[in-house]
Image: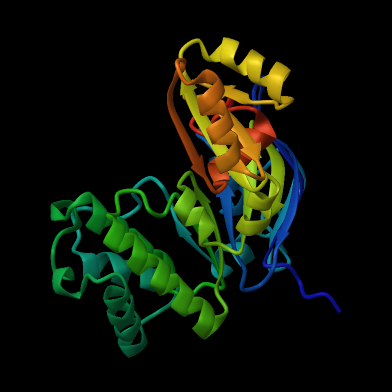
Amino acid sequence: MRPTPAVSVQEIGHEYGSRTALTDLTFDVAPGEFVALLGPNGCGKTTLFRILATLMRPTRGRASVLGADVGADPGAVRRRIGVTFQSPSVDGRLSVRENLMHHGHLYGLRGRELSARIEARLEGVQLRDRAGDRVDRLSGGMRRRVEIAKSLLHEPDVLLMDEPSTGLDPAARRSLADLLAGLRRERGLTCLMTTHLMDEAEGCDRVAILDRGRLVALDAPSALKACVGGEVVKVQAEDAGAVAARIREEFGLAPQETDRGLCIADPRGHALAARLAERFGDRIRSITVSRPSLEDVFLRLTGRRFEGSGDVGG
């Protein structure tokens, strides 16, 4: 018998007036799985996050967390999820410990159990020595770590994180990844995060790529990159459009044009780069060869650079 998905999204659509934010999204997240919602600003990922966090209802479709419908039974969903919002949700006038204590009270935690959990979470986000400090006196990165500790305090089964690495330095990001990996090993934590950071998405089991409110791909990072090809050749050239036309005519290839130059996927990228340099040497400013990235996947699937914004909010 197939286990109940930790998160299930079925034909979700949403509009803000005349603007379409989400169009017929359908996917499941298995228990214990880590999935990244990857996309540029405006792709709809924050709208979907708000729906799953029971903050808004979709225009159509159905979403559930561990079998509980987010629209029909939001209370049951809230008891099972932890949420790290992109916007601040802690009280700056209270200390770090006071914020966690009051959050624990909302979930019925008291006494030694609450104290033990606070200590564990403070240790996990490396803030034990700042527990008595007012939150508004902390750096942005430290405040972000308080947000993460808060979302994990009641030991949720499913963690929803909206751009979790916002404001974190590289060391703190690595610590967060280690903390979440440990909780998955210990308790089978499921995590669904929105992100625009490629390396953060790379660390997840699967990546759901959203573009202009649509799900354009969902697979393991390695499988997504395999669809691009063996290597990626990136060319910056004078009059890139004319060079692209000559490449199509003479090499039978289809370079994708971006504001950064030309991008060509080829199984033998280094050999192709040498041929291009020989043919267009006087017009090429730079040429690089690399393994495919998730950014290359996005370009391949949408025809646009990842940094480009979509045309909807969320």
Q: Residue furthest bottom?
A: 112
Q: Quadrant of residue 13?
A: top right
Residue 245 drawn at (x, y percent): 65, 14
Residue 225 drawn at (x, y percent): 63, 50
Residue 251 shown left or right of residue 234 in the figure: right
Asked if 142 appears above or below 274 in the picture, the reply is: below
Residue shown at the point (57%, 79%) measured from the top left: 188
Asked if 86 appears above or below 160 in the picture, the reply is: above
* Residue 288 appears in the figure: yes
Residue 184 shown left or right of residue 95 in the figure: right
Asked if 59 appears above or below 35 in the picture, the reply is: above
Residue shown at the point (59%, 26%) measured from the top left: 312
Residue 279 shown left or right of residue 99 in the figure: right
Q: Residue furthest front?
A: 278
Residue sitting nearer the eye, 203 or 126: 203
Which quadrant of the figure contains the N terminus? bottom right
Residue sitting nearer the eye, 306 or 166: 306
Residue 305 drawn at (x, y percent): 54, 30
Residue sitting nearer the eye, 286 or 101: 286
Residue shown at the point (42%, 65%) measured from the top left: 151
Residue 108 drawn at (x, y percent): 44, 77
Residue 183 shown left or right of residue 165 in the figure: right
